[in-house]
Amino acid sequence: MSTDQIILFSLFGAVFGMLLWGRFRYDLVAFSALMLGVVLGVVPTENAFAGFGHPATLVVALVLVVSAGLVRSGAVLLITRTLVDASRSLGAHITLMGAVGGILSAFMNNVAALALLMPVDIQTSRKAGRVPGLSLMPLSFATILGGMVTLIGTPPNIIIAAIRQESLGEPFRMFDFAPVGGVAAIAGLTFVALIGWRLIPARDDASISTEDLSQYIAELVIPEDSKHIGKRVKELYPDADSADVSILGLIRDGKRRYGQARSVILQAGDALVLDATPDALDEFRSTLKLALADTDREELLKAGGEGVEIIEVVVTESSRLNGRTAQAVGLAWRRRTVLMGISRQGRKITSRLRGTELKAGDILLLLVPRDTAADVTEWLDVLPLADRGLAVTENTKVWLAIGLFGAAVMAASVGLIYLPVALGLVVIAYVLVKIVPLSELYSHIEWPVVVLLGSMIPLGAALETSGGTELIAGALIGLTQGMAPWIVLTVLMVVTMTLSDVLNNTATTIVAAPVGIQMAQTLGVSPDPFLMAVAVAASSAFLTPIGHKNNTLILGPGGYSFGDYWRMGLPLEIIVVAVSIPAILVFWPL
């Protein structure tokens, strides 16, 4: 073993040890290892930052921006609002959410897919009167499984494709992962939906974060061109229930109607009085295509600059709103700000929102021009609440967002355009048509993941150049001496899967993929089945909450402990191996 190999193995060992320890964040650990590798001379200076321009790094960053655009446009809401129903049984709910999660994560980053669906799942659990821990783990596993199907579904697939291009001259294409990944995903989802969720220990102390969200009294107006004109108010109740919104009454010509409003026929300009959380209010507005109460101001805000954002503030004793109305303060014409809702615990609100006298302690939901939140809160002398990522869904651009993304995926899948370029064009288009505001462009990128990839890729390349991967491959082949190639393939898959359960799946892929290629070359067989085995195994991190970010995301909201995951995860990993090996041998022969 050469000096360079000893240093690199030591660096990788230190990185894995630090990641297991968890004392420092993974991006800092990886970047520190890269810098140390450069100083020690095992990573060439000219290659030190090559990983940050690597296609795998760029695709991961671009996918996250595209995912954000699909959310803001209402494309994801379009799917979920037609499928989710709290009255379904737990098994039916898990089956449906798993299918939606699996499909979404095939065409967007699986972490982003879970981030989109987790609030929906928690909200549905609350409506159904059950703890979210019964359905969040199946949802997490479903999004992980769905990501195996396409190139962009999960970072390991992107890395595998890039490594294949560097080693064999041609990358895997968009749907090359589908035959094997699809078989593994279908088998895994079937297990999770029918049996797996029953193995989760019930926990009554799970924290439902949505319970802490403020309920606002808000108003939404029936626009002039609304398809709901002529309907009775009660005909909107199913949509309101679906969005978890309560219709309290109706305002017409400045007069409020409550109990008798149920059978009132809607007219243009009628204002519905609602009780809802911010997310539910936006879903209801987007679904029914309603307008804000201050319609002229809404159009002004939409036309201005980079769009609008939603903030939550608390009225203080010294605030200029205390004891006054939003209309009297001139909130709309002075600050181009719309009062969307008021949360006043224990006190009734009987007047129009803009004509309601505000009190200290009231929580307000404000729609403000983008990047002016600090100025508005300072001018009002109010206390801003912590940012919960509230956004205004632009449902008028939903089909544009879907069309742009679909065209890019199709062009990349048939080889008309390089995938990173296709995604880059989608991002540019999303910014130009204001699906993603320019001011938010970089905030949607998960920079720690970018730093991790950019740091580990040069280290992995150095390990391969120094002959380190050849040593690892030789050791694994030595353990499987005289065995059939499919057994060697199985061993590689099990070892990779085990590493991925305790380490970051990105780092595992960077190390395991070159080892797989080396093993194939030593055996004199095609490297493609070994790369496919690594791709599936690196994504199959189901035993712990630290192996995959999706498992980490659900840890708190689901009320899980570290030891809960293996109950469903262990049989799931066995199933994935059992169905993947035959599928690999059929679709990617040795």
Image (cartoon, rainbow, N blue to C red):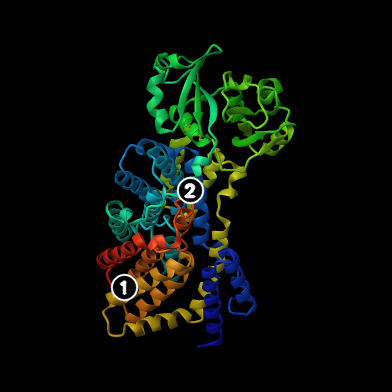
Q: Element type at marker 2?
A: loop
Q: Is residue 339 above or below residue 134?
A: above
Q: Amino acid at mark 1?
A: Thr
Task: Please name whichever residue, 496 or 457, is drawn nearer the observer in this view of the structure.
Answer: 496
Instruction: Say which quarter of the image contains residue 93.
Output: top left
Work out how far the residue at label 2 is from the one at label 1, CA to CA, in angstroms: 40 Å
- Of the 4 image quadrants, the one containing the C terminus is bottom left
Coordinates of residue 302 in the picture (x, y in percent): 58, 30
Question: Which residue bears the numbered disc 1?
Answer: 490
Q: Residue at x 39, y 65 (%)?
A: 535
Check disc 2 and report the residue beneath it: 207
Tell how many labels: 2
* Residue 22: x %, y % from top left: 55, 66
Q: Judge from the rendering whether residue 365 lies leftward or rightward of residue 205; answer left or right.
A: right
> Dot 1: few (<14), some (14–19), or many (≥20) neighbours within 10 Å?
some
Q: Is residue 198 above or below residue 228?
A: below
Could one spot residue 403 in this view of the protein?
no
Query: Image check: 242 left or right of 316?
Result: left
Please identify the residue farthest to the bottom as the structure is shown.
1
Residue at x 70%, y 20% (from the top left corner): 328
Nearer to me, 416 or 151: 151
- Residue type at mark 2 is Ser
Mark 2 neighbour density, 10 Å: few (under 14) some (14–19) many (20 or more): some
Residue 209: which disc? none
Asked whether residue 166 appears in the rendered view, the answer is: yes
For marks 2 and 1, the one nearer the N-term is 2
Secondary element type, mark 1: helix
Q: Can you tell which of label 2 and label 1 is closer to the viewer?
A: 2
Residue 396 x, y percent position in the rendering: 48, 31
Q: Position of residue 364 (x, y in %)?
A: 61, 31
